[in-house]
Amino acid sequence: PSASSKPEQDARDKIRKQRAQMVPKSELTAAEQLKWAWTHPGLYVIGSNEFGLADPQHPGSVSGIKCAVPGLEGKLIRSAAFSKTHAAAVDSSGALFQWGTGFAGNAPHTPTCTLKDASICEVAATDNFVVLRDNKSRIRVLSGSNAPNQLGSNTEVTLSFEPRLGWRESVVSMSAGRSHIAVTTNSGHVYTAALDKDGNSRGQLGHGSSTVVQPLQLHRIQSDLRFTSTACGDEHTLLLTNDGDVLGCGANDFGQLATGAYSSGKATMRELAPLPRLWKNGFLRPQDAYAVGIAAGAATSYAQIVQGEARRVLAWGRGIDGQLGTGTLTHMQGVPVVIPELSDREEFDEALQARRPLGLRSLITGANHALAVCDNRSNVVLDKSGASVNASPLFGHDVVVWGSNAFGQCEPGRRHRFAEPAHPPSLFTSTSGNLDNKLPLQAAPPQWIESAQLRDADSSSLPKKVLVEQMFVAGPDVTAAFLRSCK
């Protein structure tokens, strides 16, 4: 190499060595994965580093990266969220950290603590904002972008509820799209808000119109139904009722509201309504069937369905990157399809000496890819007395990924799309060598760990023993894992 290129090569080699030090170099068995995950707090990211979301110290157009986010080592994470250009995480003490070139600019940086509040429960990220939910039922919005936005000179804005929350009514969950949010209360009400002028451009707020609304104000959706959760795509919104029905509104360009064959008259659905083709009988839900979970990618929708003893996962909407999980690449899908690899499965339960249906513990979506943690039995015994009570070898919950892998967000080292769910290798293995021989990723279930065993953690601020669980989160071009304290 020329003299001018050698310093650049040396700099790249130095970066690779720094990243390699953050994760184990050898492949881990299932038991080793669990033990490693239980004792290594932090945020571990795979995928794109174009905007410095995985390694903000070296932002640039790097794909297939695998890295622990520097500056978050040793931190138990309550919640984390990624947008295209910025990210945020809340640690166990309530400290909010923000990073990414959209937030901090293109210079090398580490996550910045922008707020400390022990009441923060959950964080979400939109194109330009970070949204916080706390245990006082406040919804606060902070800037996630260094570009001018609706906040003006304010560092944060607390959103008002219209009408106000009732006596003992509290916010229990929230979801976010590109420029809108939806929150659910323990009374079954859903409030939605636009975060900028485009926040209701497709009628995604569920109020019956797509007119421009006053940003940063939460308005209750008028409905006699009671809801348990919401899921926001880029410009569409799904709502799950307590009876197991799914309603939707907003953009429907790819069939993400399950209206059947595409027509221009159905491209935008301003009225909140049941999804016409979710059930085989049209609007009518079979008596023995109900939805137990919903999720949304950018323009793709998912539902977990229980019917009798069967457990099924349905997908519809945009599928050109394989995010429908059926083995095909479909541009638009207006009729829900079953994901075979996640449906009608059973396992033998040794404790019950009987077969039992398998479902999902969680379904996590990025813009065009998804990750599922299965609810297969683990042999981890939840006991404060420690590892001595556990059978050996340990195994956790199976993890599968599918959809776009253009940036290695499903599996670093490969670029092809995953058209059906596949078992990715451990997040903590090197990407060198034969990828086909990698041991599959296992999600670490809840376990009691002595705080002194948590690597790089400040054990003086933690109880002697901490109940922790491994969690996952996805962004447009990244997937991440972290260790959460289960308080």
Image (cartoon, grey):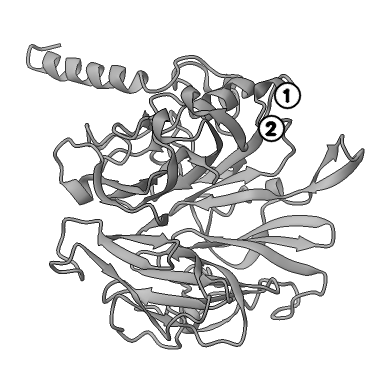
Write down the quadrant of residue 418 in the picture: top right
Pointer 1: residues within 10 angstroms few (<14), some, or many (20+)? few
Seen from the viewer's position, the closer of residues 98 and 369 is 98
Screen quadrant of the N terminus = top left
- Does residue 366 appear to the left or right of 376 in the view shown? left
Q: Is residue 140 above or below residue 374?
A: below
List x then y, in percent, for residue 82: 36, 50
- Residue at 7%, 11% (x, y): give it: 3
Q: Earlier in the sequence, mark 1 or mark 2?
A: 2
List x then y, in percent, for residue 83: 34, 53
List x then y, in percent, for residue 145: 21, 56
Q: Is residue 123 above or below residue 421?
A: below
Seen from the viewer's position, the closer of residues 483 and 412 is 483
Seen from the viewer's position, the closer of residues 69 and 51 is 69
Quick check: can you spot residue 444?
A: no
- Residue at 63%, 24% (x, y): give it: 30
**Mark 1 vs 2: CB contact within 8 A:** yes
List x then y, in percent, for residue 76: 43, 38
Q: Which mark is residue 383?
A: 2
Quick check: can you spot residue 15?
A: yes
Q: Is residue 142 above or below residue 429?
A: below
- Does residue 86 appear to the left or right of 396 in the view shown? left
Q: Is residue 273 above or below residue 131?
A: below
- Does residue 370 appear to the left or right of 447 in the view shown? left
Question: Which residue is denoted by mark 1 in the rendering?
Answer: 389
The amino acid sitting under disc 2 is Asp
Write down the quadrant of residue 413 in the picture: top left
Seen from the viewer's position, the closer of residues 314 and 22 is 22
The amino acid sitting under disc 1 is Val
- Residue at 56%, 19% (x, y): give it: 28
